[in-house]
Image (cartoon, helix red, strand yellow):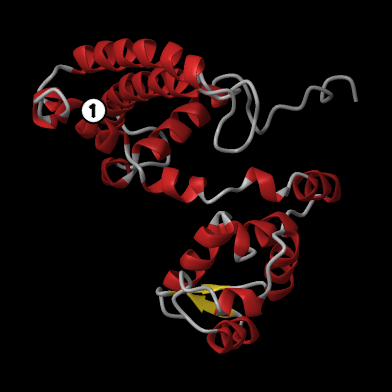
Amino acid sequence: MSPNYVPIEKKFFMQILKEKKSSIRKLGSNDKIINTERTIRRALNAGKMHRDLLNSIAKELDVYPAFLSGEIYLSRCSIQDDVLRNIALSSLRINNYPYFMKEKDEYQINDFLKNVLMLYDISLMQYEHFPFERKIEFLRALDTAILPIINNFFIQDAYGNAGLPNLQLNSIHIDQYEEEHYMNIWLQQRKEEFISHPPKWRTSKDIEKMSLSEIQALDMELQTGDFVHDDYDPFAEKY
């Protein structure tokens, strides 16, 4: 399938239209939708739709495109464990997947910083020249200043949740950003140690090709190996 097309789960798509009190006929007559009713029906019957068409429909219905296409639904259906699958499917509520999620996916933190800084004739490059510690200090100061303003002027978020339950989420992301930065420094050092002194069953060339996440997994494997041995049988002496 061409990368410009997205698989469509027709039954799920139609269910979403019903919940949104819409129809293929209404979509086809909407000037904001880039294709006709006939094109939409043809795409649904073929089980694939052009990304631009899906996006224009999703935007008009205020639904996350990956939810509308059935991608998220099918991923939940593929969960092997019956209990976990039922729990995952029960949380598939249309109000939890507004189009805002796509806009959020595309909106990077640097775009936000660039727009804010430009208001005060500061360039993003000036921020980028900060040492890492100074960047974190700036992000936290900005977040601390914005939080009470958002809390004062808005009573619900874009998902319709009252009380702004995710108001502190950006603060958590900043903490995670800092932790990941220092973790990656440590993992890079660990990788260099492994290259100099490869663990058993590994070579320096093997280590050089490994990503930092693979280095982390290897380190955990080695740490576990210090305490647990495959040939250890706790019942051997008794039985």
Give the camera-side residue of 229 and 69: 69
Residue beneath the point at 40% across and 73% down: 3
Residue beneath the point at 38% across and 20% down: 174
Query: Is residue 228 shown above or below 74?
Result: above
Query: Is residue 220 shown above or below 75?
Result: above
For residue 133, which quarter of the picture?
Answer: top left
Task: Give the structural element (helix, strand or loop) at label 1.
Answer: helix
Q: Quadrant of the C terminus?
A: top right
Residue beneath the point at 23% across and 27% down: 116
Give the camera-side residue of 5 and 113: 113
The amino acid pointed to by label 1 is Val
Per the image, the residue denoted by label 1 is 116
Give the camera-side residue of 115 and 134: 115
Residue 159, percent across and down?
A: 60, 38
Left or right: where does residue 238 sit relative to residue 7?
Answer: right
Query: Is residue 133 shown above or below 70?
Result: above
Residue beneath the point at 58% across and 48% down: 98
